[in-house]
Amino acid sequence: MSKEEKLYSDVPPTKLRNKEEKFKPADTSRFWLTIASLFFFNMLQNRFYAFRYKGAENVIEKGVPTILYAPHCNWWDGIVFYNIAHRIFHKEIRIMIEELNRFPILRHGGGYSVNKKSPQSAMKALQYSVDCVCDLKNILCIFPQGIIRPPHFRPIEFQTGLAYIAQKAVKKMGKINMVPLSIEYCFLRDNRPEVLVEFGKKVTINANESIDRKELTHILENAMTNVCDKQHEEISHGEIEDYNILFKQHLKWYRRIEQRLKRIDLPPVADV
């Protein structure tokens, strides 16, 4: 009998590989972004019945850089982030990818590398992140736990990279908004799973505010914990009416037959 592989590790992949890997920035163009947008949207449509989201109307503030941050529990998270950036907010995504050296083509979609083998290597990615978020055509997307965790993992704890980026960016721009997301992948009434995204309350800092990096990290942790717990509680009670729909599939033929059968009034069964 084969042994199941270990799904989660406390050691980042670049530390496990223990190799010197050159930093690679994003390398986007109109052509590649069009290809990526179609490809990643098609991937979601092929796998999921629907993509629902709520709370997006107050995320973007004109002239103010925005960072979206979320838990990282599975392979789909980056693709969900890409579609949020391009199809909901119509901005270019910038996203830190630790495995980028294995999939360099993702640079053309807005990915850039990070090597956590040493603090000096990781600092290059953080400094590049500051430049990205200060360019308002971009929206920076971060997984601040720094590693893939199981769904609903608690406690939610961050590395200090997100707070570092925010503090450096606010010195350049005067203000920055950080918005926590909760992303759930779940089955509702269809035979295929759905993606449900909820945007939480934004955390805003201004240049005239003095806040310790560790304190800011805890504030950001609490904000994400709150929106994740809130969404999980609502979904467990079937409260999905307030979600907008990015896409929703047509029912398969066997599901259409099922729906028709449900509408047939069967005669009552006689007592024997």
Image (cartoon, grey):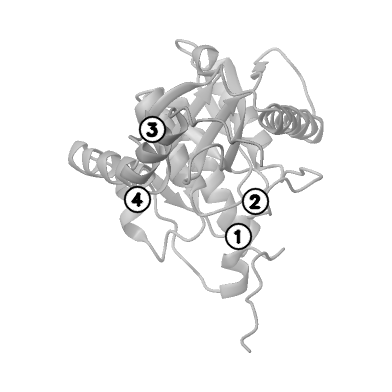
Mark 2, secondary structure of its residue: loop
Name the disc covering residue 107, or none: 4
Name the disc covering residue 260, or none: 3
Q: What residue is pinned by disc 2?
A: 146
- Quadrant where the N terminus sits is bottom right
Sooner in the amino-acid sequence: mark 2 or mark 3: 2
Q: Nearer the viewer, residue 69 or 190?
A: 190
Query: Label 1 near label 4: C-beta < 8 Å?
Result: no
Compared across the picture, whether 206 is left or right of 156 comes to left
Query: Label 4 near label 2: C-beta < 8 Å?
Result: no
Name the disc covering residue 116, or none: 1
The amino acid beneath tag 3 is Arg
Determine whether 16 is above or below 159 in the image.
below
Compared across the picture, whether 119 is left or right of 95 comes to right
Determine whether 135 is above or below 43 in the image.
above
The location of residue 118, given as percent across then percent down, is 63, 62
Sooner in the amino-acid sequence: mark 3 or mark 1: 1
Q: In this rendering, which labeled residue sits more in front, label 4 or label 1?
A: 4
Determine whether 247 is above or below 159 in the image.
above
Sooner in the amino-acid sequence: mark 2 or mark 4: 4
The location of residue 270, given as percent across then percent down, is 60, 35
Mark 4, secondary structure of its residue: helix
